Image: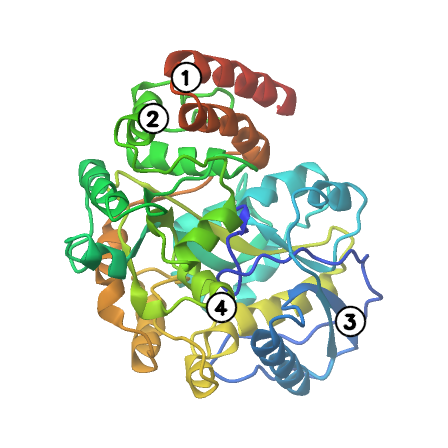
């Protein structure tokens, strides 16, 4: 889960929590869509109305106007379908999400992180949409690892909106000032350590490398760094914690060494999403782990320039944490509402050249185009079509992201563990300990966290 946006983080970068809303009145049939390049045309059908969550908020007028424009276009071509948009900021709030699920208060088509799928199913609030998903013309090209996040026991419960792989975000200007080559970013943790020391040496207030350690974000990045070293948070069957391992110890020891031996991470810790975004946006922090949406956040909300930042593939990537968000369907939905919702998601979220992927419109409106993010189709024909369109309308310096674009494709994507937020909360403790206590004992911290996660997993079976 990206807690940013948290997390993460987001039309990429937009994490919005859905306004609570129950199922709406239904009709008897819904218009169908094939996900073609133009708005789908519906045959004569009885009216059906659906509420859809995660409309961009008024504080993001560009994305909100595009959403509203697309809703109007879609409904004109599908006159039997009425979409009632529901906004909220953020679309996902870890403090209220589970309670809304348990209370059956989600929209007919509701937003969630990929880590929320299991939670929604266990709460009895997500509908099985397996028999309807062939409405999505591009479904066959979606990366299986992306659809796996919405599939449980062979049944499909949702469709993706955004996907991501974590990489290394770095400040190109600081690299140049520190005598580092911004066109040759670090590829190993040893190189990151050396670069971080040189950036810190620029003077007071400069931090070479920043890391999360609070608000569930520490556990999130522990997971990423563990995956990168070949480890896993839980066993394949989801019943046992597996992070108390050589790989897990290496993650914590490396951070402890950077913090206390290298002094390259600054004295202030317990950072969350906003803290690192503020420091990166101010040009005082050299590197953080992050997906492409981080640069959107830095530009849109921190007044930073895209050209000042680069994006590299995850260092020593045995695997990289991948995730994102998407939409599920309220268990109260009728078949007609499900079909109508899939028609909208297919058109808006899953067709290159339109909806969220209308790069021509984005460029015409002065929005940034070119970040190597959100390609649920990977290297498939549909994925290549998306990349070709993105490159055609690019407004950003593509060379700044070359390392990520070339390197991330060969790094396997690995999804977040089950019980995502609860596990991340537990793993915050060892992350914060090694960054705030010089005498922190890595072995003891992992052993204690292991017991807590095993107890959690046992309760959730």
Residue 105 x/y as whole percent: 79, 51
Q: Earlier in the sequence, mark 1 or mark 4?
A: 4
Asked if the residue under mark 1 is in contact with the one under mark 2, i.e. CB atoms within 8 Å, the reply is yes
Mark 2–mark 1 Cα distance, whole angstroms, equals 9 Å
Q: Secondary structure at mark 2?
A: helix
The quarter of the displayed image where residue 402 is located: bottom left
Dot 4: element: helix
| Count of marks overlaid on the render | 4
The residue lying at 48 percent from left, 85 percent from top is 365
Crowding around mark 4 (Cα neighbors within 10 Å: few <14, some 14 to 19, many 20+) is some
Classed neighbour count for the residue bearing mark 2: other residues with Cα under 10 Å, few (<14), some (14–19), many (≥20)? many
Where residue 231 sits in the image (x, y, percent)?
33, 28
Q: For numbered disc 3, what is the local secondary structure?
A: strand
Is mark 3 in CB contact (under 8 Å) with mark 1? no
What percent of the width, then of the height, locates residue 277?
46, 53
Q: Which residue is mark 2?
A: 256
Closer to us: 15 or 31? 15
Q: Which residue is mark 3?
A: 49
**Could you tell which of marks 4 and 3 lies nearer the N-terminus?**
3
User: Which residue is found at the position 76% from the left and 46% from the top?
Assistant: 100
């Amino acid at each position: 889960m990206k807690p940013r946006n948290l997390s993460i983080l987001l039309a990429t970068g937009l994490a919005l929590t859905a306004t609570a809303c129950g199922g709406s009145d239904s009709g008897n049939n819904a218009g169908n869509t094939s996900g073609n390049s133009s708005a789908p045309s519906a045959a004569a059908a009885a009216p059906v109305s659906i509420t859809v969550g995660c409309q961009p908020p008024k504080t993001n007028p560009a994305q909100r106007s595009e959403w509203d424009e697309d809703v109007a276009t879609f409904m004109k071509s599908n006159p039997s379908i009425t979409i009632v948009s529901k906004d909220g900021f953020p679309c996902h709030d870890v403090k209220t999400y589970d309670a809304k699920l348990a209370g059956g208060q989600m929209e007919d088509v509701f937003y969630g992180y990929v880590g929320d799928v299991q939670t929604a199913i266990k709460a009895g609030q997500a509908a099985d949409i397996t028999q309807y998903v062939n409405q999505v013309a591009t479904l066959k090209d979606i990366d299986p690892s992306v659809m796996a996040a919405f599939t449980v026991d062979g049944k499909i419960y949702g469709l993706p909106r955004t996907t991501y792989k974590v990489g290394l975000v770095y400040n190109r200007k600081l690299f140049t000032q520190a005598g580092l080559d911004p066109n040759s970013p670090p590829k190993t943790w040893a190189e990151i350590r050396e670069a971080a020391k040189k950036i810190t040496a620029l003077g007071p207030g400069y931090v070479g490398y920043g890391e999360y350690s609070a608000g569930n974000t520490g556990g999130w990045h522990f997971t990423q760094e563990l995956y990168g070293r070949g480890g896993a948070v839980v066993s394949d069957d989801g019943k046992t914690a597996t992070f108390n391992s050589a790989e897990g110890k290496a993650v914590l020891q490396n951070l402890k060494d950077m913090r206390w031996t290298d002094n390259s991470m600054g004295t202030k810790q317990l950072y969350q999403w906003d803290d690192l975004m503020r420091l990166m946006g101010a040009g005082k922090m050299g590197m953080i782990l992050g997906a492409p949406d981080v640069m959107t956040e830095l530009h849109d909300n921190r007044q930073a320039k895209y050209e000042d930042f680069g994006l590299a593939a995850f260092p020593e990537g045995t695997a990289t944490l991948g995730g994102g968000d998407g939409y599920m369907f309220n268990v109260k939905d009728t078949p007609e509402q499900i079909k109508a919702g899939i028609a909208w998601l297919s058109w808006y979220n899953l067709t290159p050249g339109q909806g969220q992927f209308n790069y021509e419109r984005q460029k015409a409106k002065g929005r940034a185009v070119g970040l190597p993010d959100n390609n649920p189709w990977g290297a498939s024909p549909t994925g290549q079509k998306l990349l070709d369109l993105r490159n055609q309308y690019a407004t950003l310096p593509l060379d700044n992201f070359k390392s990520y674009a070339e390197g991330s494709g060969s790094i396997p994507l690995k999804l977040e563990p089950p019980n995502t937020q609860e596990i991340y909360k537990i793993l915050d403790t060892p992350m914060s300990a090694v960054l705030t206590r010089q005498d922190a004992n890595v072995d003891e911290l992992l052993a204690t966290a292991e017991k807590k996660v095993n107890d959690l997993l046992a309760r959730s079976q």
